[in-house]
Amino acid sequence: MMAQLRITLAQLNPLVGDLVGNAELMRQAAKTAQLAGAQVIVFPELSLTGYPPEDLLLFPAFIGQCEALLTQLAAETDDDLLWLVGSVGRDAQGRLTNEAIALGQSKILARYAKQALPNYGVFDEQRYFSAGKQASVLEWKGVRLGLLVCEDLWQPEPAFLAKQAGAEVLLSLHASPYEVGKWHQRHTVLTQRFAETQLPIVYVNQVGGQDGLVFDGRSLVFDAQGCRYLPIAQSIQAQVTWSDSGFTCEGTSWLTQAPPSSTDWAAIWSMLTLGLADYVRKNGFKRVLLGLSGGVDSALVLALAVDALGSDSVEAVMMPFTYTSDISQWDAAEQATQLGVRYTQLPVAPTYAAVEATLAERFAGLAADVTEENLQARIRGLLLMALSNKTGALLLTTSNKSESAMGYATLYGDMNGGFAPLKDVPKTWVYALANWRNQQNSVIPQRVIDRPPSAELRPDQTDQDSLPPYETLDAWIEQRMQQGQSIEQLAKAAHLPKDDALLNRSMRLMRLSEYKRRQAAPGIKITARSFDKDWRMPITNGWRG
């Protein structure tokens, strides 16, 4: 008789540190799976703790509560459904391990310690965990299941060891954050592992936002028929049946066509709204507010916020000053009305005049410069933070990645706030996303997208007064951050002399602005390298290459 196994892929959205809440999420998922006739349910990596738990792992009480809850969950299992959960454990030397743990028959049946511990980009697992060295294969309902955790699949040896130990199916727990192009990397890796082992793979990934990371889900199965995967950004449970002929996927949620290899604006939008919504929800906020300037960045953040949270949860504040154009005020009011958000105008001039009078004696004899421009931005930041404090709404900052790279934002001014949805979105992508969103239905006045970008802090100001064209700048930033190119290499690629003034000035600004970025609000990572955990440059830095 051909062996069969009915498996539930539980693509959950846990909350880091909420051990009791995450355990309850798994209980409810297991009940649903059992009603659907499942014999195995697979949860994401560190599903009990949430991922990444970071320095919570350094608290013995946290580890103790994990183990107590794990024992409690194990006692609730039966002979019919095997739970494969992610939690922490300890090796023979007492060192912490990242584990896939099989629960069934009212006990812990098997524990597998992750062998490949990533220590690059946003991953810091070698800070906390000791690597396992052995395969773990568990027989359930006549099928031998090989256990893996996330990075294990990106290396050939763990899957090979599982096959050597007799595995017939690989069950792999994941907490793999989203970044543009990541799905295609995963597909390439899974294709390699299947070719090497000829073992079918069940891959279950976390979904949801956690601080600056956002997890796309897209859990999948991979066998001789290829890849079938679940929709992006959805908390979902899906059923598959494995037999000797491969996986049979149930329901209509499964996808087989690969996502676009070009930049997938729909996926990026989905990730930005998910990351924003979860940051707000998981941190206990009910509302957000932002400064709406009439420019494209704040217009895009407003559209994201409404899509993520609904118009009733969003407030937009226009803060005009002497240099704010009528067009900016008209466009901001039009967008706020169109999206149905609360809209307020708070003029900057009275506060600016008071500050100017206070500083008049100290500034006597000194020429006006960027200080006066920064005062405008800092007054706006003051007003917005006051509203945030008084109403309990989370203030969203609106700077993008290109501006952050150049320091083209005012510390304690427009950088004020608790979350930065565009933190990892280059300016060229801001325009692309705005146009893509308007193609779905118009939410941003077209004139906002078409006008030359300007901070409107002095007469006739545009961004390109002090920055290269954004197409050029964004290419330099990507090559510098993601490819590690030197100034000489950047110049050569752009067919410029090594001492090109604009290139060298831009790279100087990028270096000098590190102190600002250290004080910036967290934001959503969507590229291979963001200005966050995977960019750790010294502020005090003498290298000029």
Image: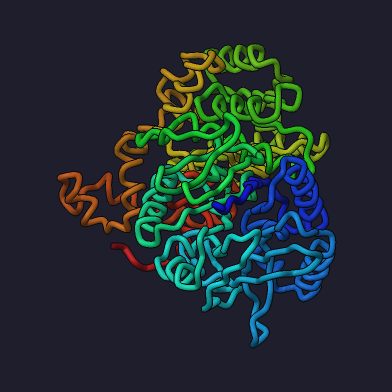
Closest to the observer, 491 or 158: 158
Q: How is the image coloured?
A: rainbow
- Compared to residue 335, the image places residue 115 above or below, namely below
- Compared to residue 39, the image places residue 453 above or below, namely above
Left or right of 355? Residue 371 is left
Residue visible at 72% across and 51% down in the picture: 15
Tell me where residue 249 appears, x and y as whole percent: 55, 38
Left or right of 458? Residue 263 is left
Q: Quadrant of the C terminus?
A: bottom left
Residue visible at 67% across and 66% down in the picture: 101
Picture mark count: 0
- Compared to residue 336, the image places residue 367 above or below, namely below
Tell me where residue 168 appears, x and y as whole percent: 50, 61
Would residue 372 be visible to someone looking at this image? no
Left or right of 419? Residue 543 is left
Residue visible at 36% across and 38% down in the picture: 467
Closest to the observer, 353 or 173: 173
Closest to the observer, 195 or 130: 195
Tell me where residue 255 appears, x and y as whole percent: 49, 34
The image quarter in which residue 352 lies:
top right
Tell me where residue 211 appears, x and y as whole percent: 64, 50
Would residue 45 be visible to someone looking at this image? yes
Residue extending furthest bottom?
93
